[in-house]
Amino acid sequence: MSTIATLILIQNIITRYALSTILALGNLGNLLTIIIYSQKKHRANPCSIYFIAASCFCLMGSNWAIAPTVYALDHFDMISNSLILCRIRGYIIHTSSMCFRYTLVLVCSRRISSRALSRPQIAYRSIAIITLFWSVVSVHLFIWESIESGHCGVYGIYGQIFSFYIAICTGFVPIVLMTSFSISLVKNLNSVRLQIVPMNNNNGRLNRRDVSFIKLILVEVVVYIICTVLYPPVIIYSQVTSYMVLNKTVDRKQIESFITFITMSLLLYLNYNTTFYVHFITSRAFRQE
């Protein structure tokens, strides 16, 4: 079997079995996360509200991203044959994924002292602002996303501009902010460990809960970086070398297509569906819930 045929077969197998499994388990996990953090005793904590919002964004983005892709393997590809659906899908995926990323940034930015004192209303307002902002900013996909050679995507000059925009807004900015805030959280965690000698039970529980949330946030950041760090350079490379398409061999095109699929589909979609399982593995209290 040739390299091209092998890569196509592997990509189809990953799409059919891996992505469908990720979607099924991800939907279950995100729904359970929403149910757990929606309990009355958790709703007073802004971090719980952020995690609920992140799970909602993940549900919306992953279903619009994965379900049509898996369906198109054996059925008519509606997305690649309807410009309206192509643009709607691109807009929803982009808006929900950006809201998810910057909701995580908001969670990371909450220092332990302010997190303990913050009101839930602040979290609701922050989520509303993020949603409104990215809903407006993503409107360009309604205008310029197109279908070429039977594939829905961004092309031409707009595609090149979009690749750098994505590299900055998806990769550089969130990763830098999350890393910076995580360093601050680690410092807070080290200082709080010295203070978890409760003078009464209520204060002790509050501190331990904050420490638990910090650990969850740090693991979320690590997972995000692992799943996202390759995305910006791959999309930039793809757009920058698009003018060389006539000089590329068929094998090279297929290899690049496969790498793009792994970084822009498999890893990104995996990231949208890991919240519940990260919390389940990391937090004993979450497992008990």
Image (cartoon, helix red, strand yellow):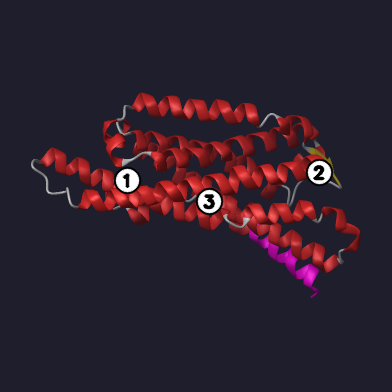
Residue type highlighted by circle 2: Tyr
Q: Where does residue 123 sit, x and y in percent of width and height?
A: 40, 29
Q: Is residue 66 visible?
A: no
Taking the magenta stretch, the answer to whether it contains residue 3 is yes
**At which x and y percent is residue 88?**
70, 32
Using a 10 Å C-alpha cutoff, classify the residue at mark 2 as few (fewer than 14 neighbours), some (14 to 19) or many (20 or more). some
Q: Are marks 1 and 2 in contact (CB under 8 Å)?
A: no
Q: Is residue 250 left or right of residue 13?
A: right
Identify the main secondary structure in magenta.
helix
Label disc, if present, on residue 213 of the rendered structure: 1
Q: Which residues are magenta?
A: 1-15
Left or right, residue 202 beside residue 45: left
The residues bearing labels 3 and 2 have C-alpha atoms spaced at a distance of 25 Å
Q: Earlier in the sequence, mark 3 or mark 2?
A: 2
Question: Which quadrant is the C terminus positioned in?
Answer: top left
Which residue position holds label 3? 271
